[in-house]
Amino acid sequence: MLLVEKKAPLLLQTLIAGLLAASLLAIAFTVYQSGAFGRLAVWLALTAVIISALLLFLPVVAPSQQEAPSPETHVSQLREQALQAELQALKAQIQPHFLFNALNRVNASLPAEQEAAREMIARLADTFRYALDATRTDLVPLGNELSFLRDYLQIEQDRFASRLQVYIEAPLSLHPYRIPPMLLQPLVENAVKHGIGPCIDGGSVTISCTLQDNKLRLTVSDTGAGYDGPLHQIMQSPGVGLRNTALRLEKLYNEPLLIARNAAGGLQFMFDIPIQP
C-alpha cells in the first residue's frame, strides 16, 4: 500500500469536515443577513461546528507499518485488530446517520421564506453523501464526479453570487469513464478560494474533459488572481489539497499534475489518466 493512499482517508475526512463547516456557515450568514431569524443563524453556525468536530474525530482505519509480531502474540493481535475494526465500523455507520439526520432537522426548521437556504442544505447533503461514499470505492464514473462538482460549485455560487461563473465542458460520451473519486475537487476548490476569492469582480472556473492520445485529459482553469511567483512553488503552500492530488496521480498512474498560467488570467491545472471504461 502506498504511503499517500494510506493517508488518503484522513485527508478526505478533513476535506469533508471543512466543506460541511464552510457550507453551513455560509447558510447561517445568509439567514443572519435577512435580519428576521437571528436565533436560527446561531443554531446553524453551532451545527456546523458540531458536525465538523464529529467528522474530524471520526476514527479512520488505516494500515500501519509495524514490526512483525512474534508467533506467541500473533493470534491475539489478530483478534484484537478484528475487534477494533468491527467496533470502528459500527461507529462509522452510526455517526454519518446522525449527520444526515441533523441536516434534515436543520432543513425542516427553516421557514418557507428561506427556500434558497433549504435548497443549499439539500445540495450540501448530496455533496456529503458523495464524499462519504467516495471513501468506500477506488473508482467512480466521471459523470458522477462532475455531478458532485456541480452541487459543490452551486453552493459556492450561492455565496459568491454573480462574482462566480462556472463552466463544465464534458461530452456525455466521456461520462462512463472511471476516475478516482474526489480527484478534481481540490483543484476546483483551489481555483475558487485562491483564484476567484481575492478578485473584487470575481471570474470564472472551467472544468474541461477531453480525450488525448487514448487518455482522459482533465483540466481545471480559472480567470482569477493568478500567481506571481514561480509556479513550482505553488506545491510548497501549507495546504494539502494540491500536493495530495499530485501524489495520487504520481503513485496511481505515474502522471504529473501540470500547472500553467491561463491566457485569460488565473491558473490552469491539467493531468492525464489512462482510460478506464
Image (cartoon, grey):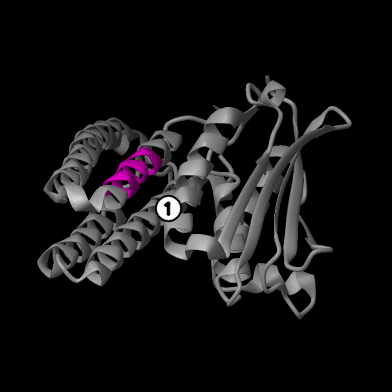
Count every numbered label the image shows and give the total: 1
The x and y percentages for residue 62 are 41, 44
Q: Which segment did they paint magenta?
A: 118-127
State whether residue 16 is above or below residue 71.
below
Q: Tell whether 228 sits left or right of 84.
A: right
Q: Quadrant of residue 216?
A: top right
Per the image, the residue denoted by label 1 is 155
Front-lying residue, 3 or 181? 181
Q: Amino acid at mark 1?
A: Ile
Judge whether residue 93 is colored magenta: no
Residue that sits furthest to the bottom in the current view: 228
Determine the secondary structure under disc 1.
helix
Q: Is residue 125 magenta?
A: yes
Compared to residue 160, the image places residue 92 above or below, namely above
Instruction: Point out residue 73 in the picture as x, y percentages from the top left corner.
Output: 29, 38
Q: Is 50 left or right of 145, judged from the image as shown? A: left
Q: Answer few, some or many: residues within 10 Å of disc 1's Cα (few below 14, many 20 plus, some between 14 and 19).
A: many
Residue found 27% across the figure and 71% down from its top: 33
Residue at the spot x=36%, y=62% of the render?
22
146 shown above or below 49: above
Main SS category, magenta section = helix
Q: Is residue 29 left or right of residue 197?
A: left
Residue 65 seen: no
Residue 138 showing in the rendered view: yes
